[in-house]
Image: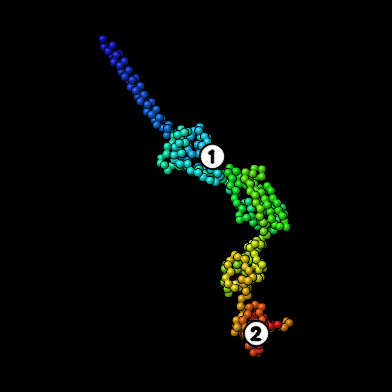
């Protein structure tokens, strides 16, 4: 073999080695990429548990419990709870669901669970009452009034995907008797998902004066002690005070509570003059008005006629109490 042949052989072997090394390197690189993808793909599709699920529908779906459920997300698992109610799906049931639908999830402990809550629209008793009142006004009820329906008007619960509205579908009202019957539909008369039959009384409301704060015997009631509140006829009795003038200047016989209608029997006129008090005597004779110092021989309240002594003349006379330690002689 000549020197040139030997050199050609060496170059061929070197070239083959280089090609082989590049192939091995490429193979190793591709293997690493495939291994990386193999490891990452399951992680990318691993599902997570939705521990607190809010559902608007009548059913619970796979996507309500797990994330990354793919094309099976709309699979129906069962009935949802009633609007406003909840149910708990425990770890064992969740594991069975995951296995059945090939969801890449396993419980971390037996405490894993999903709390499923059905969203709801709540129509309050106040909203129902306001709707009834508006309908009765349209029927001819005038003035301030309140409604009495059994013990309380119940609430109405609708699915969360419905509007929180209510309408009156039927209403009967007897003006002379102040009674009514009605049928309430929610969310509307055209879509009466839930209905409620009601009957009750229409009670007229009037404003009455009450005390802002509790007062005790001896406290004199002034205009600043009084505020007004609306009350129904049932809240009043025959001697409930409705005129502010019958409160001002009076004093409780005992204590009187704040914010409660006051009865005439609870009040009295305060004692303005005590026996032995030095008093002012006023004399009125036409346009002539005179005053003198005197002494009370009897106690009394405003409007009482008592015996007094004029300290100037030492004469005993009778006079009417018109103020605190003030009497008047006509």
Q: Residue at x 60, y 67 (%)?
A: 211
Q: Is residue 134 visible?
A: no
Q: Residue at x 72, y 56 (%)?
A: 175
Q: Where is residue 21 drawn, in percent x and y?
A: 33, 22
Q: Is residue 112 left or right of residue 269?
A: left
The residue furthest top is 1
Asked where in the image residue 95 lies, by quadrant, the reply is: top left
Q: Residue at x 70, y 57 (%)?
A: 178
Q: Where is residue 317 drawn, in percent x and y?
A: 67, 86
In this view, 172 is above or below 327: above
The 10 Å Cα crowd at callout 1, few under 14, some 14 to 19, many 20 or more, is few
Q: Where is residue 324 drawn, in percent x and y?
A: 62, 78
Asked where in the image residue 187 lies, by quadrant, the reply is: top right
Instruction: Name the residue nearer the viewer: 94 or 199.
Output: 199
Q: Quadrant of the N terminus?
A: top left
Which residue is tagged 1? Answer: 79
Q: Residue at x 42, y 37 (%)?
A: 106
Instruction: Name the residue nearer the viewer: 224 or 64.
Output: 64
The 10 Å Cα crowd at callout 2, few under 14, some 14 to 19, many 20 or more, is some
Q: Is residue 31 visible?
A: yes
Q: Where is residue 230 drawn, in percent x and y?
A: 64, 61
In this view, 81 is above or below 73: below
Instruction: Name the residue nearer the viewer: 67 or 75.
Output: 75
Q: Which mark is residue 49?
A: none
Marks 2 and 1: in contact by CB < 8 Å? no
Mark 2, secondary structure of its residue: strand
Which residue is tagged 2? Answer: 307
Marks 1 and 2, the one that precedes in the sequence: 1
Choose mark 1 or mark 2, whichever is in front. Answer: 1
Mark 1, secondary structure of its residue: strand
């Amino acid at each position: 073999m000549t020197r040139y042949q030997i050199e050609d052989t060496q170059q061929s072997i070197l070239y083959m080695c280089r090609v082989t090394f590049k192939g091995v390197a490429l193979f190793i690189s591709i293997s690493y990429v495939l291994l990386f993808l193999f490891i990452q793909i399951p992680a990318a599709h691993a599902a997570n548990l939705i521990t607190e699920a809010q559902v608007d529908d009548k059913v619970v779906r796979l996507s309500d419990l797990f994330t990354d459920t793919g094309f099976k997300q709309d699979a129906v698992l069962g009935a949802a709870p009633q609007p406003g109610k909840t149910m708990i799906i425990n770890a064992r049931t969740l594991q069975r669901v995951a296995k059945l639908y090939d969801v890449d999830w396993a419980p971390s402990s037996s405490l894993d669970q999903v709390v499923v809550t059905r969203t709801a629209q709540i129509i309050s008793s106040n909203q129902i009452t306001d709707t009834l009142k508006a309908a009765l006004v349209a029927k001819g009820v005038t003035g301030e009034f309140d409604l009495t329906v059994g013990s309380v008007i119940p609430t109405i619960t609708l699915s969360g995907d419905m509007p929180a509205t209510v309408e009156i579908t039927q209403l009967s009202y007897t003006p002379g008797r102040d009674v009514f019957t009605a049928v309430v539909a929610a969310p509307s008369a055209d879509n009466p998902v839930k209905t409620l039959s009601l009957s009750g009384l229409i009670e007229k409301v009037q404003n009455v004066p009450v005390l802002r704060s509790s007062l005790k015997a001896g406290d004199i009631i002034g205009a600043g002690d009084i505020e007004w509140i609306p009350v129904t006829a049932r809240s009043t009795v025959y001697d409930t005070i409705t005129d502010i003038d019958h409160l001002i200047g009076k004093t409780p016989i005992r204590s009187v509570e704040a914010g409660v209608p006051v009865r005439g029997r609870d009040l009295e006129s305060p004692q303005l003059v005590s026996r032995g008090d030095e008093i002012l005597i006023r004399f009125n004779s036409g346009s002539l008005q005179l005053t003198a110092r005197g002494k009370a021989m009897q106690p009394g309240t405003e409007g009482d006629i008592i015996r007094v002594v004029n300290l100037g003349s030492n004469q005993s006379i009778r006079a009417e109490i018109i103020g605190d330690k003030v009497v008047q002689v006509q």
